[in-house]
């Protein structure tokens, strides 16, 4: 059991499809991302987890070259995708990459479809950019089939308002995978959906991954979602990744006090009557970052040195990378 | 047995222009200190039931009695109105953007308790302190507060009426995990300190499990199952409840929902999606049957929950 698992790990490390190192992004005078490190292996699924304002969506925008639209720019760091450096990409390069190699399902995807166009026309519009005209219809049906849409033929003639939330999300995923991307970014793919539909969409993403060997990044604030579908996890806090590793490992042996607190704050972590663990205060907004560790003002394990040094994401023996000066002590207690 | 604070019998609500009723004959008793969860998907009538409980939606048939009188007979200004209060999902939208936290709460103290300006102000400070807000925070407007702080203001405003029942409609859905924990803790504290009865509407079963002792499961306006929260989650009898339980992330079973080609208007409300549908399900909506401990509206309820068949969700990259 151990041998193939180790081999698997090594493979994942050596063949990262996407590698982000020390990424910093600035809007105006404020750093909004600083020290984002993550990697996605070929065919693997990464969960990008964090609370509102932690920089999850900005990280996604950086990965698909949509930072300039909101006046943000990369100040430092590298994004390597399939051997290419994305930070140096120009608009023309992005146009060639986006949709074909990296695809994006945005957060507001329930309202993302054009309300006055049928699903079929919206799909055809995108398919035409990549496939010959003669195959457009077959491909559209095939895509709806891939996303397990009930009655694909009929759905082509439907307008978005005639579809349920789950079906609209399926249509958005179909649109994203038109170009047979190597990496799919899904920003909060299940947030506005009912629990039963949420589960169905997660199962769809898993089966799509199995069928196409596509890598995925799923952005979410829901640890339950992460636990269900991802192989690896990256936890973000105040614009940086503070813990990364295999999902099982991070969730069962968190090494950063923030990850611990997040896990303890889940209602399922406590029996009825016992109080949930809460984190005092609020995460700092851009421009409010203190010197040293940005979690220090809220951390129960804080020491003087935490205010002096910005901890780097470092791996410890038989642990995974975490950005905490005290992770060695914390992992053993 | 003591009188329930709130009691619904056959409560039904239809909105004009909508083809089917939003709420079909709900029965519910809320006793002092109870903690009742209402679960179901969007459009299942959870919020309509919640709003009907506070008297904010007129019933088309049936009755909801508050302090022994039907809502329709409770006039404006009757103190019994104050005994049931509600907090809402969107903490920003439920507050007046022009008023500070302190003014929001003080306004209620003045109008309801007839307190003088200074006494109301003093009382508002106390109430805000009770929900964990003090200092400069209370002189801020909703825009300057975080989501969790706004939700606290909403709770303080509800408490200003000194209610016996608090109806909380998805109180933490819009909040981050760590903030959700703070609000859930606060609700627990208030239940203990004030003996407040809680009706919690949520789609999140972990929140329901954490905070409530009994629960209703709703589907398309009907209460399809009710019972102790523990039993509902461990041993669901209605196929829809089971689908909900199986949808919890991390559950080993996939939820079983199908699309049966049947007229959705006929028979059981769940017939069109039910994996165990039989021909007799298409005759009538089955009534809730069972004991006080638990009841379900299904002709073919599930027995003991079979051991889950593990379905591997996690795909493993083969090393080949």
Image (tube, coloured by chain):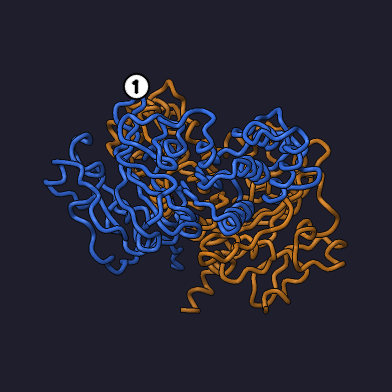
Chain colours: A orange, B blue
Most foreground residue, A320 or A135: A320
**Point 76% across, 71% down: residue:** A326
Most foreground residue, A35 or A194: A194
Quarter holding residue A315 = bottom right
**Residue under mark 1: which chain is it in?**
B
Location of residue A72 with respect to B256 vertically, above or below = above
Most foreground residue, B82 or B55: B82
**Point 49% across, 31% down: residue:** A111
Most foreground residue, B284 or B276: B284
Quarter holding residue A146 = top left
Kind of element beneath mark 1: loop
Outermost residue toward the left in this view: B279
Whether residue B130 can be seen here:
yes
Q: Position of residue B291 (x, y in %)?
A: 26, 58
Q: Position of residue B289 (x, y in %)?
A: 23, 53
Q: Position of residue B301 (x, y in %)?
A: 22, 57
Whether residue A72 can be seen here:
no
**Point 51% across, 62% down: residue:** A268
Left or right of A62 on screen, residue B297: left
Left or right of A31 on screen, residue B171: left
**Point 75% across, 66% down: residue:** A300
| Number of callouts | 1
Q: Residues within 10 Å of mark 1 (few under 14, many from 20)?
A: few
Report the residue marked by disc 1.
B17
> Quarter holding the C terminus of chain A?
bottom right
Q: Position of residue B100 (x, y in %)?
A: 73, 34
């Amino acid at each position: 059991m151990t041998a193939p698992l180790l081999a698997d790990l090594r493979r994942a490390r050596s063949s990262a499809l996407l590698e982000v190192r020390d990424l910093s992004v600035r809007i105006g005078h404020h750093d909004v991302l600083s020290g984002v490190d993550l990697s996605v292996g070929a065919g693997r699924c990464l969960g990008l987890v964090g609370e509102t304002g932690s920089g999850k969506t900005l990280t996604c925008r950086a990965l698909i070259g949509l930072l300039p639209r909101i006046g943000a720019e990369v100040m430092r760091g590298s994004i390597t995708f399939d051997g290419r450096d994305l930070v140096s990409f120009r608009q023309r390069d992005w146009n060639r990459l986006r949709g074909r190699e990296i695809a994006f399902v945005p957060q507001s995807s329930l309202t993302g479809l054009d309300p006055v166009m049928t699903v079929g026309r919206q799909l055809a519009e995108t398919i035409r950019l990549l496939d010959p005209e003669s195959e457009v219809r077959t491909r559209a049906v095939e895509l709806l089939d891939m996303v397990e849409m009930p009655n694909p033929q009929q759905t082509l003639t439907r307008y978005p308002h005639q579809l349920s939330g789950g079906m609209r999300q399926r249509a958005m995923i179909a649109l994203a995978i038109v170009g047979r991307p190597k990496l799919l970014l899904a920003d909060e793919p299940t947030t506005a959906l009912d629990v039963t539909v949420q589960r169905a969409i997660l199962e769809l993403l898993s089966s799509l991954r199995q069928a196409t060997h596509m890598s995925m990044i799923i952005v979410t604030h829901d640890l339950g979602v992460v636990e269900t579908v991802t192989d690896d996890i990256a936890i973000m806090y105040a614009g940086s990744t503070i813990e990364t590793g295999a999902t099982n490992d991070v969730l069962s042996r968190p090494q950063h006090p923030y990850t611990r607190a997040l896990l303890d704050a889940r209602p399922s972590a406590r029996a009825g009557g016992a109080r949930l663990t809460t984190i005092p205060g609020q995460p700092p907004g851009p421009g409010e970052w203190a010197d040293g560790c940005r979690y220090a003002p809220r951390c129960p394990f804080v020491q003087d040195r935490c205010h002096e040094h910005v901890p780097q994401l470092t791996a410890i023996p038989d642990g995974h990378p975490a950005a905490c000066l005290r992770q060695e002590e914390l992992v053993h207690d | 047995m003591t009188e329930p604070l709130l009691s619904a019998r056959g409560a039904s609500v239809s909105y004009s222009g909508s083809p089917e009723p939003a709420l079909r004959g709900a029965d519910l008793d809320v006793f002092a200190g109870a903690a009742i969860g209402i679960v179901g998907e969007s459009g299942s009538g959870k919020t309509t039931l919640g709003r009907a409980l506070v008297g904010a939606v007129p019933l088309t048939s049936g009755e909801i009695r508050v302090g022994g009188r039907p809502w329709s007979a409770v006039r404006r200004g009757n103190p019994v109105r104050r005994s049931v209060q509600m907090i809402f999902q969107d903490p920003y939208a439920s507050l007046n953007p022009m008023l500070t936290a302190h003014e929001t709460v003080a306004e209620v103290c003045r109008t309801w308790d007839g307190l003088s300006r200074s006494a109301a102000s003093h009382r508002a400070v106390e109430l805000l302190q009770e929900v964990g807000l003090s200092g400069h925070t209370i002189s801020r407007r909703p825009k300057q507060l975080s989501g969790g702080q706004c939700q606290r203001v909403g709770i303080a405003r509800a408490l200003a009426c000194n209610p016996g029942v608090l109806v909380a409609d998805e109180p933490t859905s819009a909040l981050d995990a760590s903030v959700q924990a703070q609000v859930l803790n606060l609700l627990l504290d208030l239940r203990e300190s004030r003996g407040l009865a809680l009706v919690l509407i949520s789609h999140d079963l972990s929140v329901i499990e954490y905070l409530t002792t009994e629960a209703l499961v709703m589907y398309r306006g009907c209460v399809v199952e009710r019972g102790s929260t523990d039993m509902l989650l461990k041993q669901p009898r209605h196929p829809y409840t089971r689908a909900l339980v199986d949808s919890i992330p991390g559950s080993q079973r996939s939820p079983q929902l199908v699309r049966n080609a049947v007229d959705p208007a006929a028979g059981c409300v769940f017939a069109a999606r039910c994996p165990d549908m039989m021909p007799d399900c298409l005759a009538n909506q089955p009534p809730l049957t069972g004991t006080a401990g638990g009841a379900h509206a299904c002709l073919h309820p599930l027995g003991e929950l079979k051991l889950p068949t593990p379905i591997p969700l996690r795909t493993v990259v083969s090393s080949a």
